[in-house]
Amino acid sequence: MAANIRVLLVDDNPMILALLRRAISTFATVQTFRNAAEALMHVVESPPDLLISDYSMPELNGKQLIEKIHGRRQTSKLPAILIATKNEITEQLRSMHDQVEDLIEKPFFTKEITRRIKRVVDKISLEKMAREAPGESVVRGNLQQMNTRPADLHSPTRASAVISISTMGRSIMRVMVGCRVTKLFSRYSLGPKVSSKLISAPAVRSRPPHAQLRHS
């Protein structure tokens, strides 16, 4: 679903840049920059769908980069993710909590940062589908719950959305996205094997009254 999302990745560390590019490229198109000033020029010319930037960089840091991008009318709502150390987030980036989709602490585990980035990418992809869908389109669901702002990181993320697209002479297509799978248990808390046997077992027919009298 997120293959059409373009991500701009900015980090002056080539190893981190290569690591994140390899991870993100499995679900989005990635372009990388080691210089924040060059990344800013590229955003002005061709805005991506998502900006991911390291905070600590020479000349222009990640916070300044995002502020400059959001200061332009054309890119004022560009989604961004900022990567920084715990101390940087606590002491220097408090004002950024409402300006970015996520603040990711480093050092990080590749699996965890990939999961969090993909969650934001999926949200952007869904919103993009809704904007670009031809004909009459209706978006239902709670997209706000897919937000990954730092204030919500400690609460379970639940999100669902249904896109219904109806056009002349076409059937309705519904796309459902779920960020949390709910496990259903039977009423009597039976295990999956037991409940499956009960479901698949053939019905037992009761004997007719005359048959019961015949054997009595």
Image (cartoon, rainbow, N blue to C red):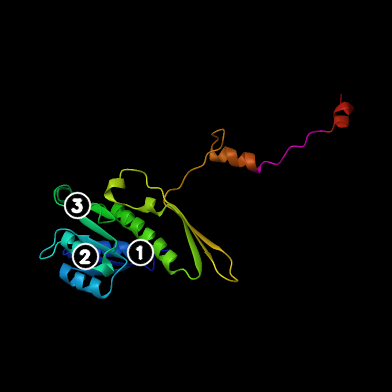
Which residue is label 3 attached to?
A: 95
What range of the chain is rendered magenta?
A: 200-207
Give the main secondary structure of the magenta stretch: loop
| Location of residue 40 by image quarter | bottom left
Which residue is label 1 attached to?
A: 26
31, 20: nearer the viewer? 31
Image label count = 3
Residue occupying the far top of the picture: 216
Which residue is label 2 attached to?
A: 71
Which mark lies nearer to you, 3 or 1?
A: 3
196, 144: nearer the viewer? 144
Few, some or many residues within 10 Å of mark 1 (<14, 14–19, 20+): few
Task: Choose the circle earlier in sequence order: 3 or 1.
Answer: 1
Quadrant containing the N terminus in the rendered view: bottom left
Identify which residue is drawn at 42% across, 48% down.
180
Few, some or many residues within 10 Å of mark 2 (<14, 14–19, 20+): few
Identify which residue is drawn at 21% across, 56% down.
83
115, 111: nearer the viewer? 115
Task: Choose the circle earlier in sequence order: 3 or 2.
Answer: 2
Residue 129 coordinates in the image, percent (x, y): 43, 65
Residue occupying the far bottom of the picture: 45
